[in-house]
């Protein structure tokens, strides 16, 4: 046997031995590892981490929560050019290999032999799916072997389309974006179906190295990677030369886009998030749940703007506090004439420095930070952080910028722009609808608004402050403040239940309390400092007379009134058990006050506030559905029902929601002398009033709902509603008449200082409460009453809330009668009395005749409940 032949035989047996050994080793390892591998069938049921999304009742996205931004997309919805791009970049033989690309593995082995390291890895898309779902990214032989085995099994279990769908939804593409749909939103602000070829190729280049090829952090490297992919697409026949040249010529257009919300409502979104976590735990952030709230997006948008406008208007009345900062330091040559020219900062350098500095100032409530670049005689030029330049004319905020001295005083009107700002000052600006720039400042005060559906307590809108990014503190649900005269209707309703009438005379006269429990003698007084003598209950309410309210509470008894407060949702143990209760010294949140007013708006039923209507899983299946107690006027229920085990008390879910929405009450340690007083001036007008009414406008519900308990008789509910309408018709809330409606009722509230301004108002369709004040409980300034500061916010909101809502008048219930009375004595009017007015009474509380006021023969002086009242009652 020749040496050549012996060598060939030896080589054959060597290769056979090595091959057999390798095969045996591979088989052994395979047999050892396969039982330990995860079941690839689980990929069909795999749940990708998808963020929690919060929606309005009309389907608009209000908020999104979760560490990973992901919007799953089906394979059929992926643009074909992107599939071509990702295959060109990652796995051009995807459709021909069985999950493992032998050529790629051999290339990886060659790199290992040459460099001692595994560099490219030779991973196919299928192998990446195996790694992303089941393994780590650590480059080891064992992980690679497991990856190969899993890829082979995945190819047997899933189709190529299913594998690609898993891949494009799982991959990390930088900036918290997981999956191609999220990446399209992050980098281009639109869905992937709307991207052009160059943009698709840019995203296709990210899986290899999301940081290195990130178009935001490394645009040059990202551009090289994108163009390489485009070239690969042409060489593989996916695109022609013309498409290649066009796409390569495209500049890098990527920029960061945050969550694309239809309406940014952060206070609402945060409340919904808290409830979702309470119900679902940590899975709320990852399992793709959708929360459908009761919020009307149109009303929410107007509520947010109304709060901003109200605070800006209040702030403007109290003067300009000056610039927030000055950038005119060391580098500015204007103040350094003696400096050598070589050391002077150029205008371009200054511009760059100022732009960089402005990025530290967040935009608050739409007010952008700007640096003053030039000051004219009656104009100002400025620069924004993004390089935008603008100018403010004299009449757009400069002329009105009288300097702030204190809450009651402002300085002189400026005569020129230099009296207001200087070059280098950081100011706040905003642009109006006519594209004109205005000087502004961030309001120092805060405000809140709550709007509820009086039929079931559903939150229609809620604003917890000027700007959530400025302060996460939700003043609508967490700030407990004294409501002042806003609380009086609750006391007056208790008085009506006890037998008083709207015509009951109460003496408006000085009163002094010298109690050992009080630190000082308490001498409450009216806001005007005057006393008006005997006053009818109706007039005392609409003119907000403090002394009458105290005597009313004194007459019915504090404890009696306290026991009556549970029907409005107030915690009796957290209310002041003294006469200061009459002036609103309790500590309540705007949400709690608004909830109390729903009883007046719906005709005497107790409902409970709730925000989350339902929660859907990622498949759209309902996992939670709210069942709020709901007003049902047609239900055959006794009016004085005592067994409310099924209808009066909400279920655990609704109770939990109420607890989550409302902060715990806490009575502040304050002197009764600091109790609330309305400061609106008296209004001279007719004393008569016509009872009007409202019907329910109950929305359809998919399931039978528990019935709301009637907690106030129809007669008392009608009376207090009619008295509150007089607040709008002729009292402290007359500004609300600008809405041009006859079915509005409400009450102002102003606390001592004044420190808190309130208005709560309603009709049959909606209840809304507005509050304005300082977080630090500082004085608002003279004449900053509820009707001055809070009511304008309410009016602006209600302009939208009442659009298309027909006026509805409440039907006069049985048991009430209208009677002609003497406006001075409150007794029935004598026959032929010219100044007599009509008043409403319960049949059991009809006033007596004076001897000289005997009725004419055949007349009892009573108008039946169904009769129309005379015009003088309007």
Image: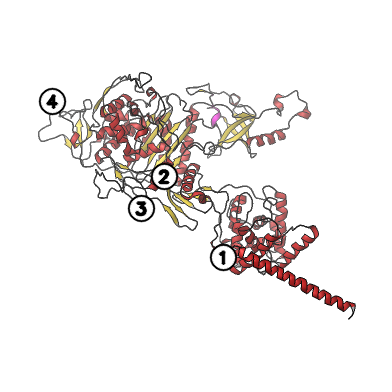
Mark 2 to mark 4: distance in Å?
59 Å
Residue at image position (61%, 63%) is 36
Label 2 sits on residue: 657
Mark 4 to mark 1: distance in Å?
97 Å
Residue at image position (49%, 43%) is 270
Tag 4 secondary structure: helix
Residue 60 shows in this picture: no
Label 4 sits on residue: 852
Considering only order in the chain, which callout, 4 or 2, is on the residue closer to the N terminus? 2
Mark 1 to mark 2: distance in Å?
40 Å
Judging depth in this view, the residue of 431 and 248 nearest the camera is 248
Label 3 sits on residue: 700
Mark number displayed over residue 41: 1
Tag 3 secondary structure: loop
Specify start and end residues of the magenta stretch as a single range.
396-404
Mark 1 to mark 3: distance in Å?
43 Å
| Left or right: 194 in relation to 115 | left
Is 476 above or below relative to 294?
A: above
């Amino acid at each position: 046997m020749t040496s050549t032949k012996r060598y060939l035989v030896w080589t054959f047996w060597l290769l056979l031995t090595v091959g057999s050994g390798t095969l045996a080793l591979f088989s052994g390892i395979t047999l050892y590892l396969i039982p330990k591998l995860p079941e690839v069938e689980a990929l069909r049921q795999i749940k990708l981490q998808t963020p929690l999304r919060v929606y309005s009742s009309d389907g608009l996205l209000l908020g999104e929560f979760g560490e990973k931004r992901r919007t799953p997309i089906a394979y059929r919805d992926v643009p074909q050019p992107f599939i071509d791009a990702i295959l060109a970049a990652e796995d051009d033989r995807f459709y021909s290999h069985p999950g493992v690309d032998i050529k790629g593995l051999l290339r990886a082995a060659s790199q290992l032999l040459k460099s001692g390291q595994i560099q490219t890895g030779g991973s196919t898309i299928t192998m990446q799916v195996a790694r992303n779902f089941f393994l780590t990214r650590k480059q080891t032989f064992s992980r690679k072997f497991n990856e190969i085995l899993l890829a082979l099994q995945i190819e047997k279990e899933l189709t190529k389309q299913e594998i690609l769908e898993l891949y494009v939804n799982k991959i990390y593409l930088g900036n918290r974006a997981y999956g191609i749909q999220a990446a399209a939103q992050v980098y281009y602000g639109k869905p992937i179906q709307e991207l052009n070829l160059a943009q698709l190729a840019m995203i296709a280049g990210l899986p290899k190295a999301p940081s290195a090829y990130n178009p935001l952090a490394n645009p040059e490297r990202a551009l090289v990677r994108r163009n390489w992919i485009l070239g690969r697409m042409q060489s593989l026949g996916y695109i022609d030369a013309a498409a290649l040249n066009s796409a390569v010529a495209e500049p890098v257009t990527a920029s960061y886009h945050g969550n694309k919300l239809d309406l940014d409502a952060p206070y609402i979104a945060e409340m919904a998030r808290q409830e979702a976590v309470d119900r679902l735990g940590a899975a709320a952030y990852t399992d793709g749940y959708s929360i459908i709230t009761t919020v009307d997006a149109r009303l929410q948008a107007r509520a947010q703007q109304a709060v901003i406008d109200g605070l800006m208007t209040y702030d403007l009345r109290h003067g300009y506090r000056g610039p927030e900062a000055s950038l005119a330091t060391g580098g500015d040559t204007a103040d350094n004439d003696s400096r050598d020219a070589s050391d002077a900062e150029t205008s371009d350098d200054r511009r760059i420095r100022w732009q960089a500095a402005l990025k530290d100032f967040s935009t608050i409530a739409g007010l952008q930070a700007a640096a003053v670049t030039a000051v004219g005689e009656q104009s100002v030029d400025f620069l924004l952080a993004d390089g935008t330049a603008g100018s403010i004319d004299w009449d757009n905020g400069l002329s009105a910028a009288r300097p702030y001295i204190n809450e009651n005083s402002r300085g002189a009107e400026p005569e020129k722009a230099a009296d207001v700002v200087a070059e280098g000052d950081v100011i706040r600006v905003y642009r109006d609808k006519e594209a004109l720039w205005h000087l502004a400042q961030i309001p120092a005060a805060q405000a809140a608004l709550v709007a509820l559906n009086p039929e079931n307590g559903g939150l229609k809108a809620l604003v917890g402050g000027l700007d959530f990014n400025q302060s996460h503190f939700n003043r609508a649900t967490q700030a407990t403040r004294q409501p002042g005269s806003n609380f009086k209707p609750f006391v007056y309703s208790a008085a009506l239940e006890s037998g008083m009438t709207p015509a009951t005379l109460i003496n408006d006269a000085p009163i002094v309390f010298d109690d050992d429990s009080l630190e000082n003698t308490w001498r409450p007084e009216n806001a005007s400092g005057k006393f008006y003598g005997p006053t009818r209950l109706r007039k005392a309410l609409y003119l907000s007379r403090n002394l009458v309210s105290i005597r009313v509470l004194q007459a019915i008894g504090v404890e009696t009134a306290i026991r009556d407060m549970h029907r409005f949702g107030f915690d009796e143990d957290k209310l002041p058990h003294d006469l200061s209760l009459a002036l609103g010294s309790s500590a309540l949140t705007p949400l709690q006050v608004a909830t109390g007013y729903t009883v007046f708006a719906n005709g005497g039923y107790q409902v409970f506030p709730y925000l989350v209507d339902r929660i859907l899983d990622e498949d759209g299946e309902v996992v939670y559905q709210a069942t709020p107690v709901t007003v049902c006027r047609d239900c055959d229920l006794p009016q004085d029902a005592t067994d409310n085990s099924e209808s009066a008390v909400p279920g655990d879910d609704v109770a939990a929601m109420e607890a989550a929405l409302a902060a715990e009450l806490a009575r502040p340690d304050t002197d009764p002398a600091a109790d609330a007083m309305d400061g609106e001036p008296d209004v001279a007008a007719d004393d008569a009033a016509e009872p009007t009414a409202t019907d329910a406008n109950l929305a359809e519900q998919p399931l039978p709902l528990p019935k709301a308990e009637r907690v106030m008789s129809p007669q008392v509910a009608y009376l207090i509603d009619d008295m509150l309408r007089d607040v709008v018709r002729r009292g402290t809330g007359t500004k609300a008449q600008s809405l041009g409606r006859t079915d509005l009722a409400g009450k102002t509230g102003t606390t001592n200082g004044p420190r808190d301004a309130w208005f709560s108002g309603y009709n049959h369709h909606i209840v809304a409460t507005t509050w304005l004040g300082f977080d630090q409980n500082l004085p608002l300034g003279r004449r900053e009453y509820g009707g001055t500061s809070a009511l304008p916010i309410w009016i602006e909101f209600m302009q939208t809330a009442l659009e298309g809502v027909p006026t509805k008048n409440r039907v006069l219930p049985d048991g009430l009668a209208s009677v002609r009375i003497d406006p001075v004595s409150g007794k029935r009017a004598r026959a032929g009395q010219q100044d007599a007015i009509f008043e409403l009474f319960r049949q059991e509380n009809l006033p007596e005749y004076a001897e000289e006021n005997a009725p004419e023969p055949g007349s009892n002086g009573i108008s039946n409940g169904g009769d129309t009242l005379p015009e003088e009652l309007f």
